Amino acid sequence: MKPKLILGLVGSPRKLGNCEVIIKEIARRIPYEHTLKLIRMPSLSIKPCSACYGCVMGKACPKKDDMDFLLDRIVESDGIIIASPVYFLGAHSIFKQITDRGFLFFRVVEKTFGKPCVLLNLYGMEERIGAAPQTLMSFASFLGLEIMESVTMKAALPGEILLNRETGIEAERLASRLFAEKGPLQGYGCPFCGCEIVKMEQKQFICTLCHGAFYYDKGHNIIRIKEGGVFGSLEHRLQHKEWLTSMKDEFLKKRKDILRTTLPYKEMGEWIEP
């Protein structure tokens, strides 16, 4: 069997911090011959999207940064382990910065679709995890990655993760899950994607990630109502790109009317800079 290429995306700037260490601990327990490559995510240069739609129209992105480097490394990998510290109810902002440039994902999604990944959120206070898991799930889902596990692990002090006796057990389990068959989702989150952040709508829950709808019956069983359609098959994702292209065409048709209605607002307010 050809050795597996494991890509570890370290979401912390700390060297030998909990994110780096747990990725390496999981990798060393993977029961296949493999190579581990690592990227320290906060060190990447990721510029904000200008909403030019150039990449959607098949043109090169005008931003010269590390997006292509990152996407190419994901493409060449066989499995990905992603870990981030929890900062103020969310994952490290680098993952949102990259997802904001998600139109570029269409360039690689046919190659990244279905690649297995494991997501880890390292927290200090359990009641302060917030939307961190959803941030990593959004990042992985829009790339078309197959989320095998999304877990939270308590570890705040640098390198503290190894002091917990349960770490080795969990690392062993996650290592065995990375290239395993996709099993049924566990827990009380969305039965379609596993996200645990939902909104209530009448007598049902709507997942804030995939927009699937479900409810619980009197026996506390999850009853699926319908899939949300945000994610799904590769073909569905490519249809999203076609829709974006059509919106660009729609804008060009209405451009004169849009400019005529917005022009009166041009001189309102005073722009200030540092």
Image (tube, rainbow, N blue to C red):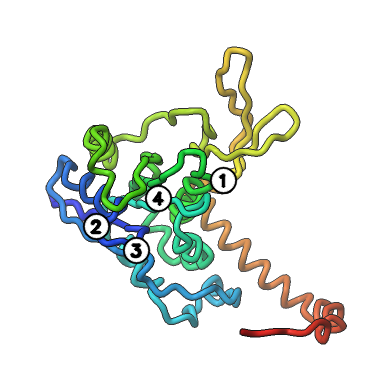
Looking at the image, residue 42 sits to the left or right of residue 36; the answer is right
Question: How far apart are the alpha carbons under marks 2 and 4?
Answer: 26 Å
**Label 3 CA crowd tier, 10 Å (few <14, some 14–19, many 20+):** some
What amino acid type should be assigned to the residue bearing mark 4? Leu
Q: CA distance from mark 3 to mark 2?
A: 9 Å
Whichever of callouts 2 and 4 sits on the residue coming sooner in the sequence is: 2
Q: Secondary structure at mark 3?
A: loop
Tell me the kind of residue under disc 1: Leu
Q: Is residue 97 visible?
A: yes
Taking 71 as reference, is 33 left or right? left
Q: Residues within 10 Å of mark 2 (few under 14, many from 20)?
A: few
Question: Mark 1 or mark 2, which is nearer the start of the sequence?
Answer: 2
Q: Look at label 2 and name its amino acid.
A: Leu
Task: Quickly name the residue at label 3.
Answer: 13
Q: Residue at x 16, y 55 (%)?
A: 35
Q: Residues within 10 Å of mark 1 (few under 14, many from 20)?
A: many
**Dot 3 amino acid type:** Pro
- 4 or 3: tag closer to the N-terminus: 3
Closest to the observer, 229 or 194: 194
Q: Which residue is mark 1?
A: 209
Say whether disc 4 or disc 1 marks the residue closer to the N-terminus. Answer: 4
What's the CA distance linking mark 3 and mark 1?
27 Å
Q: Nearer the viewer, mark 4 or mark 3?
A: 3
Where residue 129 sits: x, y (%)?
49, 44
Which residue carries the number 2 mark?
A: 16
